Amino acid sequence: MHTGRTIFSQLLDFLPKHQFDQCVRRYRGNHRIRTFSCFDQYLCMMFAQMTYRQSLRDIETCLRAMQSKLYHCGIRGRVSRNTLAKANEQRNWRIYADFAHVLIAMARTLYADDDFGVQLDRDVYALDSTTIDLCLTLFPWATFRQHKAAIKVHTLMDLRGSIPCFIRITDGKTHDVNILDNLTLEPGALYVIDRGYLDFARLYVFTQNLCSFIIRPKSNFDYSRLSYRPVDKSTGLRCDQTIRLNGFYTSQDYPAVLRRVSYVDADTNKKLVFLTNNFTLPALTIAKLYKCRWQIELFFKWIKQYLRIKTFLGTSFNAVKTQIWVAISVYVLVAIVKKELKLKQSLGEILQILSIVLFEQVPIGQVLMNNKSQNEINQFHNQLSLFNL
């Protein structure tokens, strides 16, 4: 019988503790704190995310039931819902945002050689946002509509490994295009952008920074065709054109030429039009790259399904951001564990397994790698069949 460290304690081996301490010192997170450190707060919130806790009282009850194991799991302070609520309210959310970026850098290194469906020798990113509805009475700072509150999570995702590399949390009223001003563009990279971010003045900045973009235009898009290239219509392509904008303001915002690619999806029979400033990639590759943008939609679905970002443990702006950044770091941590242990299960399956074995004292590799289903039919058994005569 294995009587060593718990699964929760073994997960801490994948967390760079010294870099977490640097993030804490950067914002003086433990200043005049004696009993419940920022690391204690992070581990409690991490436990809540991984085990689907619903409230602060729920976290307190479950952790106190495991009081004898908490010290060896890294939680040295006394767990109390009032203490945790005050920590989420007052301690700077940037501590956990910076630490999440540390984990993101680790994960991107591990997934640098992964294939995402299109063979390219450059970095490819997808940009989109998701809206999380809130109660206006409890979250008056999250302005969205007259009788409704919400926040937006704007995400730039590296398609290799589906790792988010840039996240900006705003109120629901903030328009998507404003986030383009906050991006640090990487020369030579390719950005697949949702239609909500269409702004030609900001897209021209991509061209000036030697970046490529792929985006869908609006229905009232006004342009003039300058030239065209032949396409194979059996692949779904309809046209590959070089165009120039006609509108008075749009032509000033984007004075260069653009490439317009039209494609019909064979599955939905829907016609899709793409705009890009890349004239070297094949037209079919442009269409396939935009289809890969669906990975970021799956990421939003994953974190809403498996993590706690729709029900919040605090109502302040700081508490909400703290909870979201801890959730992001848990997602990236699971991705790191999957790569380091060379697991074949999906991230959702790994998190589901971890949620019920966190305080088991067994090797983490043994639990995650031994995934044989109990419903599998064993062909070699001694029990005779009742109905075989």
Image (cartoon, rainbow, N blue to C red):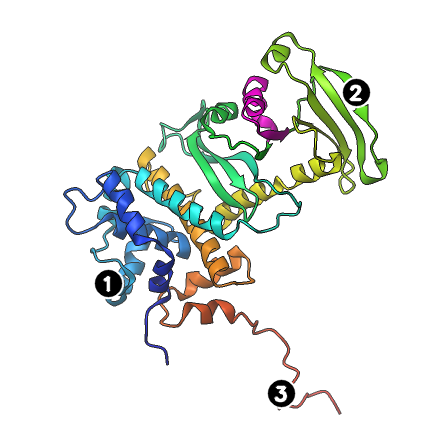
Magenta-span inclusion, residue 208: yes
Tell me the number on the disc at residue 381: 3
Is residue 141 shown left or right of residue 259? left
| Residue that label 1 marks | 71
Secondary element under disc 3, as helix, strand or loop, is loop
Residue under the image location 47 percent in, 60 percent down = 340
Q: Position of residue 356 (x, y in %)?
A: 42, 64
Q: Position of residue 208 (x, y in %)?
A: 56, 22
* Cα distance in 3D space between marks 2 and 1: 69 Å
Q: Amino acid at mark 2?
A: Ser
Secondary element under disc 1, as helix, strand or loop, is helix
Magenta-span inclusion, residue 244: no
Local crowd at mark 1 within 10 Å, few (<14), some, or many (≥20)? Answer: few
Q: Position of residue 342 (x, y in %)?
A: 52, 63
Q: Residue furthest top?
A: 248
Who comes first in sequence, dot 1 or dot 3? 1
Who comes first in sequence, dot 2 or dot 3? 2
* Cα distance in 3D space between marks 1 and 3: 44 Å
* Pointer 2 with pointer 1, Cβ within 8 A: no
Q: Amino acid at mark 1?
A: Tyr
Residue under the image location 57 percent in, 35 percent down = 189
Q: Position of residue 384 (x, y in %)?
A: 66, 90
| Residue that label 2 marks | 227
Asked where in the image residue 274 lies, by quadrant, the reply is: top right
Numbered range of the magenta stretch: 194-214
* Pointer 2 with pointer 3, Cβ within 8 A: no
Asked where in the image residue 248 lies, by quadrant, the reply is: top right
Residue mark closest to the camera, 1 vs 3: 1
Who comes first in sequence, dot 2 or dot 1? 1
